[in-house]
Image (cartoon, rainbow, N blue to C red):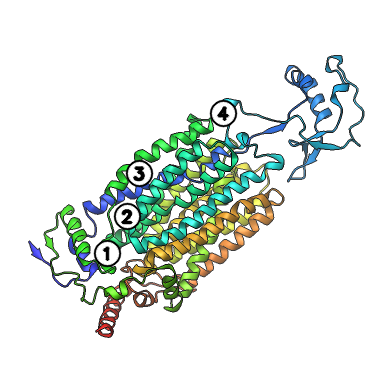
Amino acid sequence: MGITEGLNYDEALTAAGGWGRYQKLIVLISFFSAVPNAYVGFPLAVSQAKVEHHCTYPSEYYNYTTENETIRQQIIATITPLVRNQRHQMVRSSCKIYQRNYSEYHVEDWPLVFPPANDLPVADCQYGISFSLPPAEENVRMKYSMVCNDAWKAVFTASLNSVGLLIGSMIGVTGDWYGRKPMFIAACVGQIVSQILTTISWNFASYCFSILLGGMCSLVNYVAVYVLVTEICAPGWRNFISIVSSVGFSVGYCTLGLLGYLFPYWRSFLGSMVVLSTLIYAPCCWYFPESSRWLAQKGKSDLAIKGLRVIARVNSRPVQFENALKENDHVIISKSNATSSGAIVALRVLFKAGIAKRFCALIYGWFVTSTVYYAIALFSTDFSSDRFLNVFLSGIVDLPAFVITFLLLTHAGRPRTAFLLMSLTGLSSLGLPFIPKDLYALKTILAMIGKGSIGGVFHVWYLLPTEVMPTLQRSSAMSFCSGAGRVGSIIAPYVMYLANTSDIAANAMMGTASLLSALISILWIPETLGVPVPDTAAEARGNKRIYGFKLLANFGTDGARQKKRRDSVKIDETEQML
């Protein structure tokens, strides 16, 4: 049995195995735990899908609207006024009715002679609202009447979920205090509880509370997996494992369409996700490990060494760590500094350590990406008119996008991939409103390019903070970035609400913001491909591999200099500590 002494963490991890059976177990956890994350928030695309509706006809006319199409159209014209839709076409209103005394007219005496409707006032649906779906396929929009004057409820609940995501992203800071594993388990349990409450909700208020709670717990465990991956895996495998999480999320998103088709009644649909989430999360929580790197940086050397022994044993590596990662060794910060991982301290470090521009670029990238992604995922109908197929296609288009993103990240690097995908997103958003409606195939292809690009770049933004930010501020930085993304997802429903009035304005906002993010990413964010994750702010600042406008620059030989620079920084910090 070899004895490895005085190692730094990266060397110790290499000795234990940076890629082996242990890391493959993490791959499985990252994939399966990502699937149920799509079951919080995104089910709104199915359960709150738009349903055709109209004002209920007076009871004495109802049977005649189904017997003869000619009579039906004449009755509809008599009862329902014409309005102009967002494309400036005249259509029958689904929320208004002519204000008449219908009891004065007897439908059995057809043809009826009504006074001209031109000068009649219109009113809200005084006899109620009828939906095109049968009661057995009732969804949440029908249950809580999220149409007409109450259409705000659908936008409100989507934003409420995002408010929960914003709160949850701040809760994610606790990952730097208490560890990655407690944060992961708490989020999994919270998601299941919120799904149960949503399924059994008894009124609109209880439904809103469950949506908020679900948002608070959603994606917190997703972030925990991303952070863990960067801390226990060799640099060359970080992109692969993290892309697996993204694929898992898309698989979960695709299954929403399938579950909706199999269980069209909304309570059955939501209940099926409770069962699947429980079955998936239970083994993931049991096998989810704590990060040895985090333990080492927190001064818990004994536990860190114990974790490295587990990695070495599972990977069948004959290594021991009795004298490695010593508390006074230059590779591990002292206990007096190990507690500097709170939110306030993290912000102070991120803005005063010479990496503020990078942090701001990540914040803005997250904000724009979340705004565009949620606007498309929750409200777009550019893929199919069928609500289940639309969700399925919206998710399936991400899978080839992730393969392309993986190849780009591996060969072109992080900032250039973000630049390319954000540019494609921006150009597709700007072009969509100008494609004629009759060119449906072209419109669908462009929409799929935009959806795939924004889905792929989401993975890039998840990966970058974990590789750019120092260890003790990593979870905090991810939480702040995620929080910015949640602000974007709060805005997304209102951007799409604007699209009801003007497609051009909504798409121009998303397209312009995406192109600006593409520019900032290439100017301010350094290349991290093949570079060890930084443990300290000084190491993070030492990465100067920024492309700027030299998109074809090659940093291939810079890895050795980067490693040497990191080692010299550690030695300087040790001398200052001593």
What amino acid is at disc 3? Tyr
Rendered image: mark on residue 281: 3
What amino acid is at disc 1? Leu
Compared to 309, does 568 lie above or below? below
Along the horizontal axis of the image, is 303 left or right of 60?
Answer: left
Asked whether the beta carbons under mark 3 and mark 1 sit within 8 Å of each other, the answer is: no
Foreground of the two, 482 or 253: 482
Asked if residue 424 can be seen in this view, the reply is no
Give the residue pinned by disc 4. Answer: 137
Q: Secondary structure at mark 2?
A: helix
- Measuring 42% from the left and 59% from the top, which residue is drawn there? 172
Pointer 2 local density, CA inside 10 Å: few below 14, some 14–19, many at least 20: many
Give the residue pinned by disc 2. Answer: 181
Q: Earlier in the sequence, mark 2 or mark 3?
A: 2
Asked where in the image residue 56 lies, by quadrant, the reply is top right
Residue 536: x and y, percent?
33, 74
Compared to 508, does 550 lie above or below? below
Give the residue pinned by disc 1. Answer: 295
What amino acid is at disc 4? Glu
Compared to 514, does 8 lie above or below? below
Position of the C terminus, as image quadrant, is bottom left
Q: How far separated are the C-alphas under marks 1 and 4?
A: 51 Å
Q: Earlier in the sequence, mark 1 or mark 2?
A: 2
Q: How far separated are the C-alphas under marks 1 and 2?
A: 11 Å
Q: How far separated are the C-alphas under marks 4 and 2?
A: 40 Å
- Which marked residue is nearer to the observer: mark 3 or mark 4? 3
Position of the N terminus, as image quadrant, is bottom left
